[in-house]
Amino acid sequence: MARSTASRSAISRIEPGRPPAAPGLAARAQAVRRFNRFYTRQIGALREGLLQSPYSLTQVRLLYELAHRDGLSATTLGRELGLDGGYLSRTLAGFEKQGLIRKAPAPADARQNILSLTPKGRKLFAPLEQRSQQEAEGLLGALAPAAQARLVDAMQTIEQLVEPAAAAPPYLLRAQRPGDIGWVISRHGALYAQEYGWDISFEALVAEIAGRFVSKFDPQRERCWIAERDGVNVGSVFLVRESKQVAKLRLLIVEPSARGMKLGQRLVEECIRFARAQGYRKLTLWTNDCLHAARRIYQQAGFVLLKEEKHHSFGVDLVGQNWELKL
């Protein structure tokens, strides 16, 4: 039976060795391309300078990785970001010429150089980090809280479907909302009583710290992060202003149900990033030596133990510790 002219024409357009597209796939691909155009416009990727800077999207991403990760080599950066070797080499050479990065031989392989930002590089990147945060908050701030949650959930769904290995963690970090401060106070009191035998005077101290944060909150220099999982609060941390140069990390807590996901580490990292972006020079904290998991997080983040002092508080004998991280 002879094929129609239209059928023959359609078949002739199929590339040799390539199966025809599944029904609806072409239309879905168009939708993906439309979303890509929309989102690159939203984040300003098409502008010559990203975040009101002379740097491109790729250059800012390189600065971001170097600002937030240690021990990176050019090889690792190129592989993880999928960058052409020649382009990456030229870009890094430009950064080095501007005094933004430094190189040091890798301890395990002298043929490799470990890259890091110089003080000048960190100073340059800090306002870019701040502007990026402000742009993201501006995008979300135009939406109602329920719509914000839908948008973030949709973004996490895209990550999980397209690249499961790099999917977002199973929790959401957000700013405090009405009712959250009461939860912070209550859960500190309950958990520390259950796990360490501390009495109600500790809950009173937490209430004092949290109340002062709310009553004197400076949104430009202070921040609270609430970790939420499936609509339930599972962690928190606060960063408060001590002086123009010094910030303090306070009230880190992770619910037992959320432990093992590196949530505590993530909360501390957010504090450090925010402190650097706001131009603080030092981040301090006070804890007690019995809080082993928290102390490990602080050590891994680079905090240094400055002083220890025995004291009797919250109904038990403790050893208080002062830690510091120079930013």
Image (cartoon, rainbow, N blue to C red):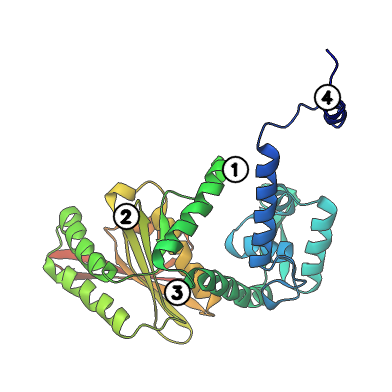
Q: What SS does tag 2 mark? A: helix
Q: What SS does tag 3 mark? A: strand
Disc nearest the viewer among 1 and 4: 4
Compare residues 272 and 316 and report the one nearer the observer. 272
The amino acid marked with disc number 3 is Leu
The earlier-in-sequence mark between 3 and 1 is: 1
What whole-number distance in Å separates the C-alpha atoms at marks 3 and 4?
A: 61 Å
- Circle on res. 17: 4
Q: Are marks 1 and 4 in contact (CB under 8 Å)?
A: no
Residue depicted at 28% across the width and 67% down the height: 180
The amino acid marked with disc number 1 is Val
Locate residue 146 relative to residue 251 in the image: left or right.
right
What whole-number distance in Å separates the C-alpha atoms at marks 1 and 2?
A: 37 Å
What whole-number distance in Å separates the C-alpha atoms at marks 3 and 1?
A: 37 Å
Disc nearest the viewer among 1 and 2: 1
The residue to which callout 1 is attached is: 162
The residue to which callout 2 is attached is: 292
Residue 136 image point, x, y percent: 54, 69
Check the image and report above or below for 6 versus 135.
above
The earlier-in-sequence mark between 3 and 2 is: 3
Q: Are marks 1 and 2 in contact (CB under 8 Å)?
A: no
The residue to which callout 3 is attached is: 283
Q: What SS does tag 4 mark? A: loop
Disc nearest the viewer among 4 and 2: 4
**Mark 3 surroundings within 10 Å by alpha-carbon count, few (fewer than 14), some (14 through 19), many (20 or more):** many
**Mark 2 surroundings within 10 Å by alpha-carbon count, few (fewer than 14), some (14 through 19), many (20 or more):** few
The amino acid marked with disc number 4 is Gly
